[in-house]
Image (tube, coloured by chain):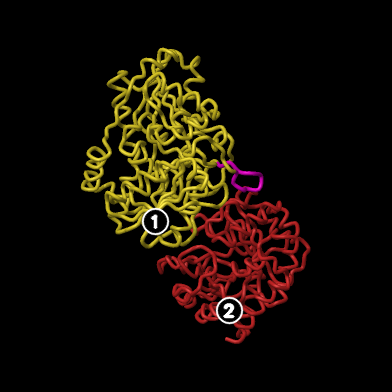
C-alpha cells in the first residue's frame, strides 16, 4: 500500500502503520501495549487478551541482559523471563503462526539483532509474523545498516524521538521511521510516574505538525488519565510498565486485559 | 603508527560508534564539540596541567625494580601511577572531564565504579571544583571495596548501590546510564574508562596520554630508548591505552592483560553494549555474560573499542591470567620491592612473572596503575 507524503514520493505502509492510521482516521486515539515475551507460561494468551481488550498494536518485549532504557519494572520482568529460559529464538518461535489478532512489533536492544545478524534477524521477524521493530539504543546516527535491511525485508523500523532532540533532528527521524514515531514522554527510563511529565505533551506537539506518520507518546504513561492527557496533542500512547507490572503480579491474561480495557475506554471517551 | 583520532562517526577501525538512546545523542554530540574546543584552548590546557602537577602530583616516577628484575631475569620498570593523588591513574581523566563539565555549565558529576578508584577520583574532583557527585557501584563491589565506599562518602559523594544483574561494574554502568538519561540537562557522565559512546573512548585516552608521554621520556632517560615490552592490565582499558599511546610508534611490543574470567578480547565476539561496538563476552543470543574476577576494577565483560581495534590489526596482543596468578604477583611485588600493587596491575605483573623465560634479557615497562591499599582487607581474607 502506498500513500503520498509531503515531499511527493511514495513510502510503503506496513501493518503497524496501517492499523494506527485506521484508528486515527476513524477519529480514535491509538493504543500500543507492551507485553514482555517469555514472561510466564501465559504471555502469548496475555497478548491475545490485550488485543481483544482494544490494543491496536502489541509490542513484544524480547528480554536483553542490559536494558539501559528500562526502569525497574521491565528490568524485573526481563530477569524473570531470562531466568525461565526465554531467548529471542524461543519468543519468535512461539509467535510463529500464533494469531494474536493485531499487528505486532518487537522491542529489544540492538545487540540481540546484531548477534543474530541483521538479515537473519529481519527474516526471523517476518517469519514470526512480526511487522515492526523498536531498538531503543539505536539512534539515527547508527541506524543506517538496520534501516536498509529492514526496508529490504519489509520490517517497519520504529524510531524514537526524544525530548532533548533539537528541532532540526525531528524531521529526519520522522522521515526514516515506519509504523509510527515513538515520542519519548520524559527524560528518563520506562516506568510508571505519579504525574504525567510536561515533556510528554510537548514532544507530541513538536512532532505532530511535521509528520503524517502516527505520533505516539510512550515512557511514563502509567494511568488511563495520563494516556488521555498525553494523547491530546498526538495520536495515541504506548503503555508498558503498568501492564508488565500486572504480568509480574500474575494477574493472568484477564487481569492484564482488564487494565488495557480501562485505557481503551478512557481514550475512547476522550 | 601513533594512536589515531577516531573517524567522524567515532570508529577505531570497525569498532566504536555511538549506540545510545536518542535522549543522549545531543549530549554526546555536544560533548565532542566542547571537548575539541577545550583541548584547543590554551587556558583549559594550562588549568588542567596545573591541576595534574600541583594537585595530582604529576609527573609520576618510573622505578627500576632491581630485586625483581634479578629474580625474573628481565629488566623491569614500573610506571608509578600508584603514586598519584587518590592512588591510581584514574585522576588524569577525571580532572580533565570535571574541568570540561564545569566549562559546559554542568553542576553534577555522575560516575560508575568497579574497584572504587574511579569513584574516589570523581568524588575528589567534585569536592575540589564544588560539584555534586553521584557514584554507582555494584552491590558485590560495595562489599569488597568498603574502604573506597567510605572514602567517596567522606569526600561528599553519594554512593548508590546497583542491585541489578551481576551487581558489579557492568551493572553500575547500566545504572549510571539510566541516571544520565533522566538528568542529562544538569549531569555530566564522567565515564571512567576508554569505553562507552564516542567521544568517550577517544577523550578518555587523550586525558591519559600524559602518562604515556612521561613513560616514553623516562624510558629514553633510563634505557636510552623505548623498552622491548610494555604491559598493562585491561578491564575497559584506560591505563593500558594511556601507556600504549606513548609507545605505539616504537618497535615496542604492547601487551594487555585481562583477567581469565573477564577476557573480552580473548573470549569475546563483537557486540554492542554501553554505547559501543567492541569485543564482548556474550552468549549465542547476544545476552551479555557476567565477568568473574578477583579484581573489581577488571570485572567487566567488555573492553574499550580501540583495544578491539589494536587487537584486530595485531598492534597489541591480549593475554589472560588467573586469579591465583594475580594473588601470587600481588605478594611478589610487595615482598621484593616494597610496593603493594592494586589487584588490577597485579594482573600485568602476573603475566610478566609467568612469561619470565620468554622475557629473559628484555626491558619491560609495567604500568602500575594503582596502589593496593584498597585491596588489603580482601587479601587478608584470601591469604588467611
Q: Tell me, what hue is chain B?
A: yellow
To the question of a shared chain for discs 1 and 2, the answer is no
Where disc 1 sits, the SS reads helix
- B158 horizontally vs B218: left or right: right
Task: Pinpoint residue A40: horizontal percent, then vertical percent.
Answer: 72, 60
Q: Among all residues in the image, which is located at the extreme right?
A: A97
Q: How far apart are marks 1 and 2 (CA)?
A: 36 Å
The residue stretch that appears in magenta: B280-289
Q: Tell me, what hue is chain A?
A: red
Q: In which quarter of the image is the N terminus of chain B?
A: top left
Residue A224's disc is 2
Q: Would residue B259 be seen by someone viewing this image from the given angle?
A: yes
Q: Would residue B1 be seen by someone viewing this image from the given angle?
A: no
For residue B335, above or below residue B243: above
Q: Is residue B283 magenta?
A: yes
- A102 horizontally vs A229: left or right: right
Q: How crowded is mark 1: few (under 14 residues within 10 Å), some or many (20 or more)?
A: few
Q: Image quadrant of residue A53?
A: bottom right
* Count of numbered tags: 2
Tell which subunit mark 2 falls on.
Answer: A
Could you tell me if the residues under marks 1 and 2 are in contact, i.e. CB atoms within 8 Å?
Answer: no
For residue A207, above or below residue B92: below
Of circles 1 and 2, which is in front? 2
The residue located at (49%, 43%) in the rendering is: B143
Q: Image quadrant of residue B339?
A: top left
User: Label 1 belongs to which residue?
Assistant: B29
Amino acid at each position: 500500500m502506498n500513500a503520498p507524503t509531503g515531499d511527493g514520493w511514495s513510502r510503503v505502509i506496513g501493518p503497524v502503520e496501517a492499523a494506527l492510521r485506521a484508528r486515527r482516521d476513524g477519529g480514535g486515539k491509538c493504543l500500543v501495549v507492551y507485553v514482555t515475551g517469555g514472561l510466564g507460561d501465559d504471555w502469548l494468551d496475555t497478548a491475545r487478551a490485550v488485543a481483544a481488550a482494544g490494543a491496536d498494536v502489541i509490542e513484544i518485549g524480547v528480554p536483553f541482559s542490559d536494558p539501559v532504557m528500562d526502569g525497574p519494572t521491565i528490568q524485573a520482568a526481563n530477569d524473570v523471563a531470562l531466568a525461565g529460559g526465554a531467548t529471542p529464538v524461543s519468543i519468535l518461535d512461539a509467535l510463529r503462526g500464533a494469531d494474536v489478532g493485531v499487528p505486532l512489533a518487537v522491542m529489544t536492544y540492538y545487540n540481540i539483532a546484531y548477534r543474530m545478524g541483521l538479515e537473519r534477524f529481519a527474516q526471523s521477524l517476518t517469519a514470526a509474523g512480526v511487522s515492526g521493530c523498536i531498538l531503543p539504543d539505536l539512534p539515527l546516527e547508527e541506524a543506517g545498516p538496520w534501516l536498509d535491511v529492514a526496508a529490504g525485508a519489509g520490517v517497519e523500523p520504529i524510531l524514537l524521538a526524544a525530548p532533548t532532540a533539537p528541532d532540526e533532528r525531528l524531521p529526519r527521524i520522522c522521515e526514516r521511521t515506519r509504523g509510527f514515531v515513538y515520542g519519548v514522554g520524559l527524560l528518563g527510563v520506562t516506568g510508571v510516574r505519579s504525574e504525567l511529565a510536561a515533556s510528554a505533551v510537548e514532544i507530541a506537539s513538536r512532532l505532530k505538525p511535521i509528520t503524517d506518520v502516527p505520533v505516539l507518546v510512550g515512557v511514563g504513561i502509567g494511568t488511563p488519565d495520563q494516556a488521555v492527557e498525553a494523547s491530546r496533542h498526538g495520536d495515541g500512547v504506548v503503555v508498558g510498565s503498568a501492564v508488565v507490572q500486572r504480568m509480574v503480579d500474575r494477574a493472568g491474561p484477564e487481569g492484564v486485559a482488564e487494565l488495557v480495557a480501562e485505557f481503551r475506554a478512557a481514550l475512547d471517551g476522550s | 603508527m601513533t594512536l589515531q583520532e577516531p573517524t567522524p562517526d567515532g570508529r577505531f577501525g570497525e569498532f566504536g560508534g555511538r549506540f545510545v538512546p536518542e535522549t543522549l545523542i545531543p549530549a554526546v554530540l555536544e560533548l565532542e564539540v566542547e571537548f575539541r574546543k577545550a583541548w584547543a584552548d590554551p587556558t583549559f590546557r594550562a588549568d588542567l596541567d596545573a591541576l595534574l602537577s600541583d594537585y595530582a602530583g604529576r609527573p609520576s616516577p618510573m622505578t627500576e625494580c632491581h630485586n625483581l628484575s634479578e629474580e625474573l631475569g628481565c629488566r623491569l620498570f614500573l610506571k608509578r601511577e600508584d603514586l598519584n593523588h587518590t592512588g591510581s591513574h584514574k585522576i588524569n581523566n577525571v580532572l580533565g572531564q570535571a574541568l570540561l563539565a564545569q566549562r559546559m555549565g554542568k553542576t553534577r558529576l555522575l560516575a560508575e565504579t568497579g574497584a572504587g578508584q574511579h569513584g574516589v577520583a570523581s568524588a575528589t574532583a567534585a569536592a575540589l571544583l564544588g560539584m555534586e557527585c553521584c557514584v554507582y557501584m555494584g552491590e558485590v563491589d560495595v562489599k569488597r571495596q568498603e574502604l573506597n565506599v567510605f572514602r567517596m562518602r567522606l569526600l561528599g559523594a553519594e554512593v548508590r548501590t546497583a542491585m541489578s544483574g551481576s551487581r558489579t561494574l557492568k551493572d553500575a554502568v547500566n545504572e549510571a546510564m539510566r541516571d544520565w538519561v533522566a538528568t542529562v540537562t544538569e549531569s555530566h557522565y564522567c565515564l571512567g574508562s576508554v569505553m562507552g559512546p564516542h567521544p568517550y573512548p577517544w577523550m578518555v585516552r587523550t586525558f591519559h596520554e600524559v602518562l604515556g608521554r612521561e613513560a616514553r621520556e623516562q624510558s629514553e632517560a633510563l634505557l636510552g630508548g623505548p623498552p622491548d615490552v610494555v604491559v598493562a592490565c585491561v578491564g575497559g582499558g584506560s591505563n593500558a591505552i594511556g601507556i600504549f599511546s606513548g609507545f605505539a610508534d616504537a618497535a615496542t611490543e604492547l601487551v594487555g592483560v585481562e583477567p581469565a574470567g573477564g577476557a573480552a578480547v580473548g573470549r569475546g565476539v563483537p557486540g554492542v553494549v554501553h554505547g559501543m561496538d567492541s569485543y564482548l563476552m556474550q552468549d549465542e543470543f547476544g545476552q551479555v555474560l557476567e565477568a568473574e574476577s578477583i579484581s573489581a576494577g577488571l570485572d567487566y565483560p567488555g573492553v574499550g573499542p580501540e583495544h578491539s581495534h589494536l587487537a584486530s590489526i595485531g598492534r597489541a596482543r591480549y593475554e589472560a591470567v588467573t586469579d591465583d596468578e594475580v594473588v601470587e604477583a600481588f605478594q611478589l611485588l610487595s615482598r621484593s620491592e616494597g610496593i603493594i600493587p592494586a589487584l588490577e596491575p597485579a594482573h600485568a605483573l602476573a603475566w610478566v612473572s609467568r612469561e619470565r623465560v620468554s622475557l629473559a634479557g628484555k626491558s619491560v615497562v609495567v604500568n602500575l596503575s594503582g596502589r593496593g591499599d584498597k585491596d588489603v582487607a580482601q587479601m587478608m581474607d584470601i591469604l588467611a
